[in-house]
Image (spheres, helix red, strand yellow):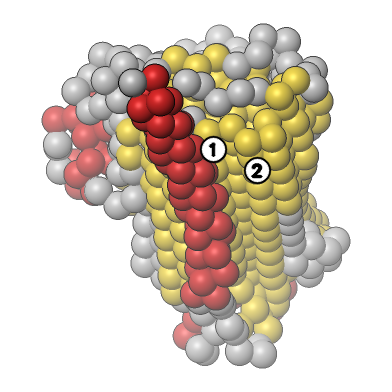
Amino acid sequence: MRYKKTLKLLALLFFTLIVMIGSAQQTTSSSQKGWSQLKEVLASIKKTKFPNKDFSIIKYGAKGDGVTDCTEAFKKAIAECNKAGGGRVVVPEGIFSTGAIHLKSNVNLYVSEKATIKFSTDPKKYLPIVFSRFEGVECYNYSPLIYALDQENIAITGKGTLDGQASDENWWAWKGSKKTSPNNQTEHVNALNKMGEMGLAVSLRNFGEGHYMRPNFIQTIKCKRVLIDGITIVRSPMWEIHPALSEDVIVQNVKINSHGPNNDGCDPESSRNVLIKNCEFSTGDDCIAIKSGRNNDGRRVNVPSENIIVQGCKMTDGHGGVVIGSEISGSCRNVWAENCVMDSPNLDRALRIKTNSVRGGIVENVYMRNITVGQVKEAVVLVSFKYQEGDTGQFTPIVRNIYVSNVTSKQSDYGLFLDAYERTPVTNVVIENCKFDGVKKGNLLNFTKDLSFKEFYINGKLVANEK
């Protein structure tokens, strides 16, 4: 009898071992498969191509004296370039003042190395209102500083500077947080959000003058083949680079230094095949924030963000390095981040996923590797289902398949901060070959399922898999 019990015990142990090995192999296989897909996605991104023709804005009446209003000169040069089949609209050395710039197909706005485009802070320069998305809700609002709708093969390139001139004295005061102002956006944003929840026709959501909703710096909507390369962006009214409902977007070699409220660096929203490469971010909000619409309006449009790639970027100040959410109601899948450096006492998290049961959405297949994190305030990896409104809605979010490997950090409050709901835990988080040092509070794991740790160290101590 004892012999049979021993055999049964050995058989059970053997079976358990096989299951564990199989599970580990499956986890490794899933991660490897995800990274192998990256090459295919990169190869599929269609690139811009322009005729070898130049259209200098000087020819159309622009003066680089920092005083002359060059709005019409930009408009005429872009129209002529587009009519001729495309090419470069060249901004030469100098300081050029302007209002809104609207790009057209096959136009490359080339900002020379010693050129600065200074955008007016007069809101009237961004009228008439245009179709836009404000924090994930569709509406008609002030034109972004640089705007394109339904265009194809467009670019902003060169080593020059785009200066939004935003400050607490103009655009930033509209937020109503940095300085007391009778003109702030709060009631108007609330009104827009209510329109979105009610399903009011977008054509009736007219804002702009008198509503104090700040424009984005660069916004491309429903555009194909977009390139933003080499430029420096400073002092934005709010989000800096916002490709929405666009595909085949490349943002590379861009430097962003803008610390106003909601000054996200790059926000791909409901967009597909987006590469963000070799950029530097020092921002007043998230460095990169992937979005897909807010609440009912995001579910109405129902276009996810997918195939988003972040490579070789440097993140300093900001709420998060690579962030997904919070306007993520249309969902997000297939995100890769690799070979980045994230380090600042003013950077809050490295990887951050934020949502709640009002926002909802499915976030899945997120891959992160070879990331050097110096100092972050809160956590190296954070998933929170309790952002802002918390668990007060009917659209339970889902987060699954998060793979983090070869990530090091030197200082943070938490290593992992995974805070979900009991009815929908964060599922299948794999941490492999990671070393988080200087962690003050360890890991916070509320409602998780299928966590897998392999060679995962916190403060030099191996972290065991949960049983």
Within 10 Å of disc 2 (Cα), the crowding (few <14, some 14-19, many 20+) is many
Q: Position of residue 427 (x, y in %)?
A: 40, 32
* Amino acid residing under circle 2: Ser
Name the residue located 24 percent from the left edge and 48 percent from the top edge: 301
Within 10 Å of disc 1 (Cα), the crowding (few <14, some 14-19, many 20+) is many
Task: Name which quarter of the figure residue 456 lies in.
Answer: top right
Residue 433 position within the rendered picture, expressed as x and y whole percent measured from the top left: 70, 39
Q: Is residue 148 above or below residue 433?
A: below
Gap in angstroms between the C-alphas marked 1 and 2? 8 Å
Circle 2: element type = strand
Indicate which disc residue 405 carries.
2
Q: Is residue 308 left or right of residue 92?
A: left
- Location of residue 71 with respect to 198 vertically, above or below: below
What's the residue at 44%, 74% (across, down)? 152
Q: Amino acid at mark 1?
A: Val
Residue tagged by mark 1?
Answer: 430
Q: Position of residue 378 (x, y in %)?
A: 65, 18
Do the residues under discs 1 and 2 have CB atoms within 8 angstroms? yes
